[in-house]
Amino acid sequence: MPAQSSPPRTDSRPGGRSARVRAAVHQAVKELLADEAGDALTIPVIAARAGVHATTVYRRWGSVGELLADVATSRFSGDVVVPDTGSLREDLERYAYDLARDLSDPDTLALVRAIVGTGGEGAGVCRMERQRQLEAIIEREQGRGNEVPSIERAIETLLAPLYYRAVFTDQPLSPEWARSLVSHLLPK
């Protein structure tokens, strides 16, 4: 009696190999950064940690900078909720507090420092996501018919000091300090 072959599968695998490789490589980057091995962040080291071939990583991302940009996109998209309290001052204070708390997380800080260190497009990913969040807060307030600061002023007054202190100093990002930045942007 001839062996019966099974019918071809028609259901698709969610994610598949590509998603598994991406997840493994992202996890390897996070682990290496957490192990404070950021200076050893090379494609071969990342690939070995992820259990994939280095050519797979090179083919997909091309460079450590591009890989960090992908990890950053995955990490920073939607991680800080844009508050809507009905008050611009309260929204910005809550936003600054949430961002300070996020930047105080050792894993987030390690990723941000690695991105800054590569000078790659990952820095743009961080900046653009945070800029979109600030724009949403400011545009919503403008839609209420109220006067608002420019987005450039908000970036210079809120984002720049938060990121500078987080990346380049050992000073804490205390909630009080983060909220105080809003008083420089919106004097009473």
Image (tube, grey):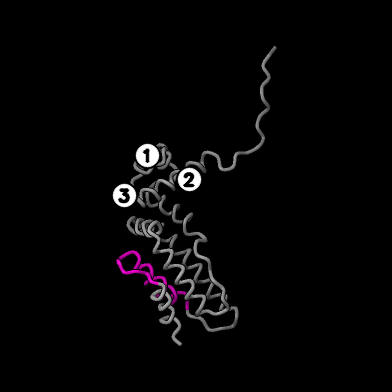
Q: Earlier in the sequence, mark 2 or mark 3?
A: 2
Residue at image location 43% in from the left, 47% down from the top: 27
Q: Which residue is mark 2?
A: 23
Tell me where residue 42 appears, x and y as whole percent.
Answer: 33, 46
Which amino acid, by three-letter code, is at mark 2?
Ala
Q: Are marks 2 and 3 in contact (CB under 8 Å)?
A: no
Tell me where residue 133 appears, x and y as whole percent.
Answer: 51, 68
Q: Earlier in the sequence, mark 1 or mark 3?
A: 3
Q: In the depicted view, which residue is nearer to us: 87 or 53? A: 87
Q: In the depicted view, which residue is nearer to us: 120 or 30? A: 30
Q: Quadrant of residue 115?
A: bottom left
The secondary structure that most of the magenta stretch takes on is helix
Q: Which residue is mark 3?
A: 37
Q: Which residues are magenta?
A: 150-174
Residue at image location 51% in from the left, 71% down from the top: 135
- Marks 2/1: CA distance? 14 Å
Q: Quadrant of residue 120?
A: bottom left
> Circle 1 — which element?
helix
Residue at image location 67% in from the left, 16% down from the top: 3
> Circle 3 — which element?
loop
Which amino acid, by three-letter code, is at mark 1?
Ala
Q: Which residue is mark 1?
A: 48
Q: Residues within 10 Å of mark 2 (few under 14, many from 20)?
A: some
- Marks 2/3: CA distance? 19 Å
Tell me where residue 131 appears, x and y as whole percent.
Answer: 47, 68
Which amino acid, by three-letter code, is at mark 3?
Ala
